[in-house]
């Protein structure tokens, strides 16, 4: 429970979001910097899509942590 | 191939379904008063997917066929920004709610001093900048209709203009029906948002279906496609572009452009900020929307590969999505793909045109009309002005698609618009996070950015279409090669788009920063900045509806204000009194040690001073004395007014409403005061009744105590009567026998007299106790008399039950004069003695001891019995009223509590001596009573 609360607070931090932004930006730039001649298309494809999916998964986890039901609207 | 009539029929059926859905959604909301059908996070996230236009639907495959995975930059950059949604979008929505923002231009104008000039610049630039993007959608609809009808990829030509105009008119009608049917101050369009979400779903399913068809029916899955990629490229094409610095910058440019476009494209701002119903929806959209982008793009590479491997020309890449099912005679799938593409295009046209026409009418038309009094009457026709703006926008876009479109792929046209939107980003971000940014800086930044954008992207587009001499591209204007639009200062390292982005940002940010630093904000702008700061801070000025006073600036020196007050007070008081009054006020407000205070404390100081003066000289004089004293400076008055205005705004009441509420509250307060008075009277009545009942209870208790000693009294009276009786009998016998021994006779009569006196004292003691204590007065008696009053009523009873009563007191103590209420003190002692009697009556050893000792100031009486003492638990309760350890009906539980109460009336005290091995109550009484 304590861990959950800590993670919840972390998800709400603007600094955490900015760190994630930079982290994923580097992941997305990496193929353009590090893959020689970009011959390995398959590697680049999976690299970018898996990174992208990880970004979605983290956002989803933050939503789950921040409320009991994802997408719940109490309005 | 399909006939045009059939395609037309399909389009009309689809539009009809959309109209009915939108109307049903709006009617549902109106009828049920429940917006949940639209105001939910899933509809919100799906409506954001209007980002994926026909550019995504058809253009991504086009760019993938040309440049490999470069297309992904347009979605990865967007997903990066979405990662910041819970932080950034929340702030934008807070500002929208506070300032009733209706568009991205409105957002910029609201921050920068509500500058009309800035509004005009933004509106004009948005109109020009977004035209290419709307043109893409029109181009895609026209192209796909022609492909379905002719089976070829036609270029837009004059010969097909009738069909084109028909489709453009349909776009205009649909836009007006869905988005511009009526004016709404909130600028929310629930029906439109509902169908945008529906369309997003349709286009996702359509593209996903054709993607699965291409990947798993026409190919053997992803692995097979990747293995065969090198064979379709033919010319060593590596499918990821070339690994040069040129491509790296292109990739970065795509990321940057899409990161800004996802939030600041007019339509994205409209759906994400203006159409937002709850900030809670942001969290869901932060994963659902990227997931949508992920799914809609997953089959782009397979579709591009399949198009190339099926032998389609690379020039037709924008149409692969439609051509693939067509080639394999999958008519149903072809129609579904067309509907998906049509959905993507028409959805974007509707929402973008609504956003642009709102901006153009609010920021461009209306301010211009206000400038010309002869045209002022047109301001009444705001809705029609928007219709006009929508017609102009869509027709201009069509013209652009017709004249410029053939020279550009879909993606290139869209990126021109993305670069236009990027020009707003520095002003928006600086407005949010840089306090010094001002309207002059924003005007300079956006203007320079727009001019460079026009020069580096728009002019080349027209030059390539033949509207300008191509020499401007090669030689530069007036032969100045360093001013070539796509290579300013010879910067040829970058592609035209990256080049344009670099120079626009360089001039935009540079001029924004320099001009903002060199110029000053107006007073209004400073207030707006402060308000933004409050909205963006984690510590809002209002917390749970209460003003957070700690956030107010503490910048007002208190001493000058106190001097003003002192001067005012000295008109009516001598100097010392005035100073004393001020000191008291500052102490009350707890600001006596402060040098600086905030505006709220200053108003409190003023109020307290006015109240104090009102008590001295009346409210009217007090008010005018302070009013004429310049207590508040003009700036402080404004600040105070602003604080109250913010308070009212926060409470969402206007001053008239507040005044009405105050009047109502005053009325209620009056009613409450009346009720309180009635309640007070009732309370007093009840209280006096209770007092009477209490007195009666005391009296009853006294009588109960009396009852307890009644048996003893009977013995006391009986004994003297027996003595008198036997003495009388002896005297009678002596008279009958004529034996009149004088000495004996005298002895008998003396004995009778003494016995009568004793009986009389007993009766007097009873009368003393039965009297009401209120009428008794304190009197001076000896300790001996005091003890005798009590013991007289107990001695016989104790003796008859075998209880030994011992009294220990020295002569001095017995003769000591003590001032007591004879009745109550006697009753107290009797109660203690009775309590001891009851406690030991069943014990084998039975004695009660009274031990009295006096000093010059007080008398101490110990009442000890043969019992073993009282347990600590009982000691806590023993003096409480109605507490008893006796059997039910045998004790009232009032004896000891009354006794203690009487002792306290004498300013005395009672405690239990726990050091004594037996039960020992220690009573201390002062010799002199001080009332």
Image (tube, coloured by chain):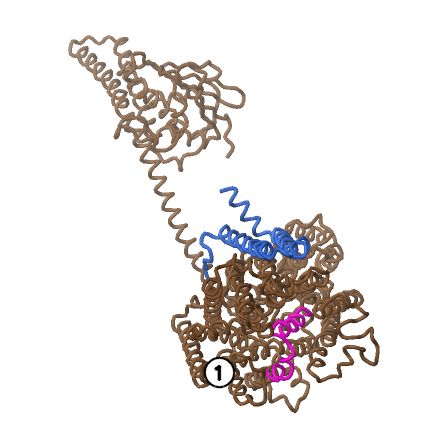
Judged from the image, the secondary structure of the residue bearing numbered disc 1 is helix
> Which chain gets the blue colouring?
A
Between residue B118 and residue B82, name the one nearer to us.
Answer: B82
Image coords of residue B838 (percent x, y)? 31, 21
In the rendered image, the vertical position of residue B709 relative to residue B465, given as above or below? above
Region in magenta: B398-423
Is residue B563 visible to the viewer in this orientation of the structure? yes
Chain B colour as displayed: brown
Image coords of residue B723 (percent x, y)? 24, 15
Q: Is residue B56 magenta?
A: no
Image coords of residue B889 (percent x, y)? 25, 30
**Residue shown at 49%/59% (left/top)?**
B221
Residue B744 sits in which quadrant? top left
Residue B448 sits in which quadrant? bottom right
Q: Is residue B296 toward the left or the right of residue B10 in the image?
A: right
Write down the residue under mark 1: B149
């Amino acid at each position: 429970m304590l861990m959950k609360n800590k993670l919840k607070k972390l998800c709400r931090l603007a600094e955490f979001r900015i760190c994630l932004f930079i982290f994923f930006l580097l992941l997305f730039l990496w193929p353009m910097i590090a893959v020689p001649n970009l011959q390995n298309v398959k590697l680049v494809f999976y690299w970018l899509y898996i990174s992208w999916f990880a970004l979605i998964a983290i956002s989803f986890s933050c939503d789950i942590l921040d409320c009991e039901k994802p997408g719940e609207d109490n309005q | 191939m399909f006939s045009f009539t059939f395609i037309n029929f399909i389009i009309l059926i689809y539009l009809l379904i959309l109209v009915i859905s939108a109307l049903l959604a709006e009617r549902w909301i109106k009828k049920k008063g429940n917006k949940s059908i639209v105001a939910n996070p899933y509809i919100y996230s799906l409506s954001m997917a209007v980002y994926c236009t026909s550019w995504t639907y058809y253009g991504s495959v086009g760019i993938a066929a040309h440049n490999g995975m470069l297309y992904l930059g347009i979605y990865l950059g967007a997903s990066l920004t979405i990662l910041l949604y819970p932080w950034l979008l929340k702030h934008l929505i807070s500002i929208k709610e506070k300032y009733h923002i209706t568009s991205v231009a409105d957002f910029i104008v609201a921050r920068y001093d509500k500058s009309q000039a800035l509004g005009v610049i933004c509106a004009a630039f948005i109109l020009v900048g977004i035209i290419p993007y709307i043109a893409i959608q029109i181009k895609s609809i026209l192209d796909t209709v022609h492909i379905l009808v002719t089976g070829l990829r036609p270029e837009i030509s004059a010969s097909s203009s009738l069909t084109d105009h028909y489709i453009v008119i349909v776009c205009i009608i649909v836009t007006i029906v869905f988005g511009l049917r009526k004016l709404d101050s909130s600028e929310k369009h629930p029906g439109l948002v509902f169908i945008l979400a529906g369309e997003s779903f349709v286009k996702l399913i359509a593209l996903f279906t054709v993607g699965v068809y291409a990947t798993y029916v026409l190919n053997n899955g992803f692995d097979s496609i990747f293995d065969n990629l090198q064979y379709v490229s033919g010319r060593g094409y590596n499918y990821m572009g070339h690994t040069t610095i040129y491509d790296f910058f292109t990739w970065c440019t795509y990321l940057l452009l899409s990161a800004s476009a996802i939030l600041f494209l007019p339509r994205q701002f409209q759906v994400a900020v203006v159409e937002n119903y709850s900030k809670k929806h942001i969290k869901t959209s932060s994963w659902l929307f990227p997931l949508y982008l992920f799914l809609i793009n997953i089959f782009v590479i397979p579709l591009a590969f399949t198009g190339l491997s099926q032998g389609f020309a690379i020039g037709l890449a924008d149409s692969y999505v439609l051509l693939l099912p067509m080639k394999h005679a999958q008519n149903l799938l072809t129609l579904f793909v067309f509907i998906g593409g049509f959905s993507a295009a028409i959805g974007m046209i509707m929402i973008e045109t609504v956003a642009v026409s709102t901006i153009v009418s609010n920021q461009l038309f209306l301010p211009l009309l206000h400038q010309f009094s002869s045209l002022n009457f047109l301001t009444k026709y705001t809705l029609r002005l928007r219709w006009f703006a929508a017609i102009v926008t869509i027709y201009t876009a069509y013209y652009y698609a017709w004249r410029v479109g053939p020279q550009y792929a879909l993606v290139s046209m869209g990126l021109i618009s993305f670069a236009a939107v990027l020009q707003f980003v520095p002003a928006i971000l600086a407005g949010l996070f840089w306090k010094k940014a001002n309207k002059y800086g924003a005007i300079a930044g956006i203007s320079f950015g727009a001019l460079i954008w026009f020069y580096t992207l728009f002019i080349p587009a027209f030059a390539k279409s033949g509207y300008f001499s191509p020499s401007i591209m090669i030689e530069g204007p007036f032969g100045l090669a360093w001013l070539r639009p796509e290579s300013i200062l010879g910067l040829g390292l970058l592609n035209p788009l990256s080049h344009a982005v670099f120079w626009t940002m360089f001039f935009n940010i540079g001029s924004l920063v320099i001009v903002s630093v060199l110029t000053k904000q107006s007073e209004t702008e400073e207030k707006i900045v402060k308000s933004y700061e409050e909205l963006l801070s984690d510590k809002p000025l209002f917390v749970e509806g209460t003003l957070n006073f700690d956030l107010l600036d503490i910048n007002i020196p208190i001493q000058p204000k106190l001097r003003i007050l002192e001067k005012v007070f000295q008109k009516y008081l001598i100097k010392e009194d005035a100073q004393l009054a001020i000191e008291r006020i500052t102490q009350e407000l707890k600001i006596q040690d402060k040098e600086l205070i905030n505006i709220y404390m200053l108003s409190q100081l003023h109020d307290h001073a006015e109240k104090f003066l009102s008590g001295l000289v009346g409210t009217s004089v007090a008010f005018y004395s302070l009013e004429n004293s310049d207590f508040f400076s003009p700036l402080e008055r404004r600040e105070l007014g602003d604080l109250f205005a913010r308070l009212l705004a926060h409470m969402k009441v206007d001053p008239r409403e507040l005044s009405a509420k105050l009047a109502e509250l005053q009325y209620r307060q009056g009613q409450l005061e009346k009720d309180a008075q009635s309640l007070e009277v009732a309370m007093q009545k009840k209280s006096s009744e209770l007092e009477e009942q209490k007195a009666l209870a005391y009296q009853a208790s006294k009588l109960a105590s009396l009852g307890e000693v009644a048996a003893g009294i009977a013995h006391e009276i009986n004994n003297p009567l027996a003595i008198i009786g036997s003495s009388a009998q002896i005297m009678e016998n002596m008279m009958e026998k004529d034996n009149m021994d004088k000495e004996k006779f005298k002895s008998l009569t003396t004995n009778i007299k003494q016995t009568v006196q004793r009986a009389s004292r007993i009766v007097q003691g009873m009368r003393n106790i039965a009297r009401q204590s209120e009428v008794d007065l304190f009197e001076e008696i000896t300790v001996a008399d005091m003890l005798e009053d009590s013991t007289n009523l107990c001695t016989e009873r104790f003796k008859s039950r075998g209880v030994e009563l011992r009294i220990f007191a020295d002569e001095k103590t017995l003769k000591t004069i003590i001032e007591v209420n004879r009745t109550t003190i006697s009753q107290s002692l009797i109660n203690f003695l009775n309590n001891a009697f009851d406690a030991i009556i069943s014990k084998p050893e039975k004695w009660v001891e009274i031990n009295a000792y006096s000093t010059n100031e007080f008398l101490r009486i110990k009442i000890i019995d043969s019992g073993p003492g009282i347990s600590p638990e009982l000691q806590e309760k023993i003096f409480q009223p109605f507490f008893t350890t006796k059997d039910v009906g045998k004790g009232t539980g009032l004896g000891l509590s009354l006794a203690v109460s009487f002792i306290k009336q004498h300013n005395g005290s009672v405690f239990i001596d726990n050091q004594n091995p037996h039960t020992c109550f220690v009573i201390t009484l002062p010799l002199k009573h001080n009332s």
